Amino acid sequence: MDPETEKKRQAWKVIITDGLMTLAAVVLVGFLVLTVSGYWINENFEVARSGMLQVASEPTGATVAVDDDVLPQRTNASRVIPVGEHTIKIEKDGYDTWSKTIEIKDGLLYRLRYPRLFPNEPVIEKTPIEFDRAAIMSVSPKRDFILVANKTNKWKLVNLEEEKVNPKEIDLAAVFPSGINGEISNIEWSNDQNHILLSVLFNDKLDWFLLDLNNTGRSINLSDNFGVGFYEVDFLNGSADNLLTLRDKMLQRINVNNKSISAILADGVEKYHYYGDEVVFTANGSDGAYIGSVKANKDEVKSIRKIEDATADAFISKFYDNEYLTLVEKNKILVFKRDDLNNAEYEFELSFTPTTAKIGRMGEYVVAIMGNVIATLDMEAEKVREWQIETSAFDWLDDSMIYQSSYGDVVVYDFDGLNRRVIITDAREDFPVVITNDDRWLYYMNSEGLVRETLRK
């Protein structure tokens, strides 16, 4: 073959190959751009808008159906699905069913991280803790321990994750030689779960104690040491070394190591909440009501934003990669990005004025409460849902689930009031119900004593 002809043929091959590769790259980039922008190719080879759904469950390995179409993946599962409303159903053999209708928005991720399934036929195991009507049960913040307290100086500590329940005795004779003279009104735990803040009410006097569960001899009577009556005491940043106190609406810090109390950090304080090492509070100042902030181990107070009502609830939280300031004031929920406190990202008007509020650990929801009426702002859905519970006596079973006890029945709801289920039929109402941090067991008190159910088959 003529060398010149061969060169031309090779040149055309290179041109065609490069052209095909360039075209493939353009098509691939275009496909990725469309996918990121919220589009996909449906079964009819048409371009349609879509979003991403991520579904987790406890326990894992459950089937997920989107509008009755069962996904090939089991939880934890991800799927691109069309924009619009979809009913998600989660099922697993031997467990109850969970479902919710959600709205998928184009190009956005919708995460369902909290669905929990309960066994249809629970296995119940008795523990050595017998029923005591006068006892008080308190659950540690990480749901690793239960403290069984009473007016004696012999308490019991239960490690909830042990295979065999073997309660540890806590001897408080060094703190209360003759037992507790008064009513236990409050028990708070430190983050390390080794310390307890205890308040005892006697003859209208409230005494506060810092109890060391590992060495009760190192416990401190805070009221005696500082000679003042505290209205409220809390662990600053969850540490037993520094405490935050509220007395006559004056916010102060206690250094436990050197037993000193700071000057007044802020006056007129109504409510406060924690975000990491930061305390965010609402207060009345000389220029009116405001939201303030103070860091742990520092006495410098900053004003974050002026508000109308100092009894409002204000929270700092993080959702996805953004920090937010959430304000529950009068009959409104306002959500601001932390770097723009002048313009609300979301504003929702409620049909009632909440008295208390709570924000999810991951910032995924805000719950505003008045009695048994609840409004839930679902940050994932960007919607508020108002609903009612049977009584105003309820608590949190885990980070995303509310429960109430009535006539032996324990009824659970997701934070938005959906998926109502009866999970226990013989529980004592005055004692907490807890799911362990590792999701293995459900603990509660019945007429015989403390029992636990296995949550994973």
Image (tube, grey):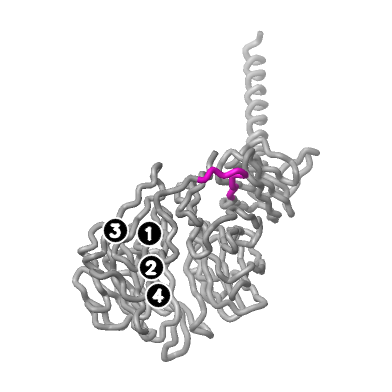
Q: 14 or 73, which is in the foreground? A: 73
Alpha-carbon span between mark 3 and mark 4:
37 Å
On residue 187, the disc is 2
In percent of width and height, residue 283 lies at: 44, 83
Q: CA distance from mark 4 to mark 2?
A: 25 Å
SS under mark 2: strand
Q: Residues within 10 Å of mark 2 (few under 14, many from 20)?
A: many
User: Label 3 amino acid?
Assistant: Ile
Identify which amino acid the numbered label 4 is placed on. Answer: Ser
Q: Secondary structure at mark 3?
A: strand
Residue at the spot of label 4: 293
Q: Please tell me whether mark 2 or mark 1 is closer to you in this view.
A: 1
Residue at which label 1 appears: 147
Q: Main secondary structure of the magenta part?
A: loop
Position of 292 with respect to 219 (left or right) is: right
The earlier-in-sequence mark between 4 and 2 is 2
Confirm or deny contact between disc 2 and disc 1 (CB under 8 A): yes
Query: Nearer the observer, disc 2 or disc 3?
Result: 3
The residue singled out by tag 3 in the image is 170
Provide the secondary structure element on which disc 1 rests.
strand
